[in-house]
Amino acid sequence: NKFSGSVNLYSTSWKDRVVSSSDVEDDVVLFTTNFGVEQLHMGLEIDGTYRVLDNLRLRGFLSVGNWRYKGDAISRVTDEDQNIIEETVKDVDGGEVGDAAQTTFALGFDYKLLDKTSIYLDYNYASDLYAKFGITNERPIEIDRQNAWKLPAYHLFDLGFNHGFKIGDFNATLNGKLNNLFDVEYISDANDGLTSDYDTATVYYGAGRTFSLGLKIKF
């Protein structure tokens, strides 16, 4: 067959996820525990490959999700003796789940130059990525919120090759990969701020252009 693929529909509920952290204030160790909230993940995933020619194959993947919080989140602060210093209940119902892009798309090709030599190019797109807040990033939940900051979408290209050869009686493969081919500057992750925007968020930029080279020998 020239084409193969799969389709997956999912609906997953994660309940009572607990995230804990500790801090020291005025020589007193305080423990913050965020718990009680439910995450509902629903979405569609499609992937497939198509053999255009004997030496050319196309690959594709699409994932579209709708990930939301349900209910209230409880943030509890205790001391070393488990005495409750503070406990707050915050409304996060309907808020977007952060830390991973909810919409992703990938397209690539593998081209066989010689019997044991091939190159490949991959395109990756990510969007609907939201900043993390309180219940997931181990910080206190400061305010009621349903809308975390939405990070800018980004596009990345990766280029690589594989080359097979002999080292004596052993089969060997040399492989190399150029990640983020066009050295795109993008935000890969963030912790949300009080105003849910770039100005108050703590952001983490993705890696620029990097190169890796490897050698595999089969004994």
Image: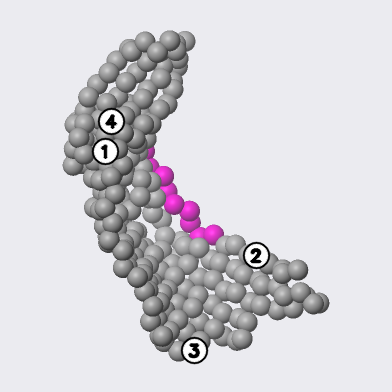
Residue 54 disc label: 3
Q: Residues within 10 Å of mark 3 (few under 14, many from 20)?
A: few
Seen at 38% across and 81% down, the residue is 3
Measure how far apart labels 3 and 4 are at the Cα level: 54 Å
- In the image, which residues are magenta? 201-210
> For the residues marked 4 and 1, what is the alpha-carbon distance in whole angstroms?
7 Å
Residue receiving disc 4: 36
Q: Secondary structure at mark 4?
A: loop
Up/down of 79 relative to 73, above or below: above
- Tag 1 residue: 38
Q: Which residue is mark 2?
A: 214
The amino acid on which the numbered mark 1 sits, given as a three-letter code, is Glu
Residue 144 found in image quarter: top left
Kindly report the distance in space between the C-alpha atoms of the residues bearing marks 3 and 1. 48 Å
Q: Residue reaching furthest right?
A: 168
The type of residue carrying mark 3 is Asp
